[in-house]
Structure formats: structure tokens, C-alpha cells
Amino acid sequence: MVRHGGGRGWRGRVLAATLGVAVLATTASVWTAQAHPGRQVHAEPTARPSSTAAGAPGAAPAAVPRSIVHASDRGARGVNITIDDGPDPVWTPQVLQVLRDNGVKATFCMVGPQAQAHPDLVKAVVADGHRLCDHSVAHDTGMDHKAESYQRQQILDAEQMIIEASGGVRPVYYRAPGGAFTPYSREVAASHGMRPLGWNVDSKDFERPGTAAIVATVKQEVANGPTILFHDAGGDRSQTVEALRQVLPWLKQQGYTFGFPVVR
């Protein structure tokens, strides 16, 4: 797994939200894609949860395990599609349509100010039966080296932004930017009902290597584990949209079913 870059074009605007400055809605995200070497995040054994819908409006957060989850609630042949860094007004609707066309539910890991700027898209994600995931305020891939007070603010401020944008639906998971988890950040998230979420397959779509390369990566690496990482923001995601059109039917043909990461 790679640690994805924090040096994106709108990072300054996102950091302004960290200081309490209102974030204005924009017509598109304009991030500069940049990837850096990172860490492996290892799966820990977890139990399968019930099939009850998580993150329901008004539900009080119940503590969940602090271990980083990868497993699918659909068992050994289940896969979890996860979509990071949005929502984005250009690409999120297209991703939603591809998921809808294939009857697939996914987990959307949202950056707080993006959710705040596009509440209509957050609500559309929820309306289609997908789950929400907290992906921090500033997408700071170095936050594991920052003060605990900063880590807490990044997680909980983004959580509140997502809840407000969704109309009261809570994020079910927390994914640290670039996998920059710490024991403290996992505890903060878990105590607020957000299971720390890793990934097994990095599609490398953020680097825009071409649709064929994205599809090939997923096909080659899906045996590594069920949770697959894609992006719906951070630049031109047309390759991601087309890759999803191709890889979702292929996964079905291989006998995989689509689920969500286990929560408990």
C-alpha cells in the first residue's frame, strides 16, 4: 500500500477549515496528484457483524473495535469497494451511476470540507445505500507524526462535517490519509463508532496510469484481500470510472460478491 500524497492543490483551503474558516463550495476539486512510499497496514482478526444498517440517522455512536479492518461481511468471496477523497461534483455522480448499473454498494471515504461543500452528493451516496467513512479534514498523510490534539481534531471535525452534510447519517469507518494511523487515532475513531479501515488492493488509480493498468492491478492483486481502493476526486478520474465499468462485472464473473468491511 502506498502513502498517498498530501501536497494537493486545495490543501491550503482544506487546512483553513481546520482553523474554523468557512469553506466555500467549488465546482470541482483541483488537487495535484502526488504519491509517496508508505506503510503496510495489517489486518487483524475480526468477527462478522450482523447485516443491520450502520450509521443510521440519530443513532448514538457505540464503540467498535480499534483494530484496522479489511475483512468483508460477505465472507471469503466478498470484496469491499472503497472510494476515497470525494465527494466531487464531476466524478462522484459518474461513480455512483456505474455502481448503480452493476448493483454494487460501496464505502465512500470523504474528506470533511468536500462533504461540507457538496452535501447533495453526500445525500445521494446515502440514498443509494452506500456507507460513509471519515477521511479527515485536511488529508494530511503526515498526521501520525502530529500531536494527539491535532489527530483528534482532524477525525472529529470531519465526522461532524459529514454528519451535517448527510442530514444526520454517521460515518461507519475512519480511514487515515495514506494509512497514517496511530494507536491514538484508532482509539478516537473507534470510541466514536468508526471502525479503522485499511485496504488490501491499491488500484493505483490516483496516479492515472491508464484504465488498462488500473484493471490489471485489481485483477492481479484481488487475491491479496477483499478491500479495494479507488478515488473519486483529486483530479481527472475518468480512468477510474471506466476501470470500474470493466472490473465490477469481471469480479462478479469470478464469483465474488460485494459487501462492506466488517464493523464488529
Image: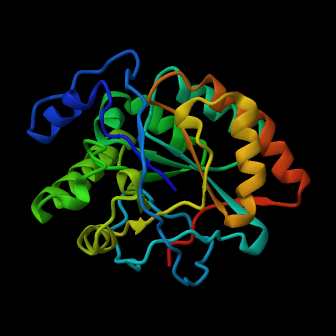
Q: How many marks on residues?
A: 0
Task: Judge whether 237 appears above or below 143 on screen.
Answer: above
**Horizontal arrangement in the rendering, residue 103 relative to residue 30 (left or right):** right
Q: Position of residue 167 (x, y in %)?
A: 36, 43
Residue lying at the far right in this picture: please name it.
253
Quarter of the image where one finds residue 53: bottom right
Q: Residue furthest top?
A: 27
Q: Nearer the viewer, residue 137 or 123?
A: 137
Q: Nearer the viewer, residue 162 or 43?
A: 43
Establish if 91 lies above or below 75: above
The answer to which quarter of the image holds residue 205 is: top right
Residue 156 visible somewhere in the drawing: yes
In the picture provided, is 24 more to the left or to the right than 176?
Answer: left
Q: Which residue occupies the foreground of this view, 149 or 220?
A: 220
- Residue at 75% x, 74% y is 76
| Residue under the point 71% across and 57% down | 221
The x, y position of residue 77, in whole percent, is 79, 68
Residue 116 % position (x, y): 30, 34
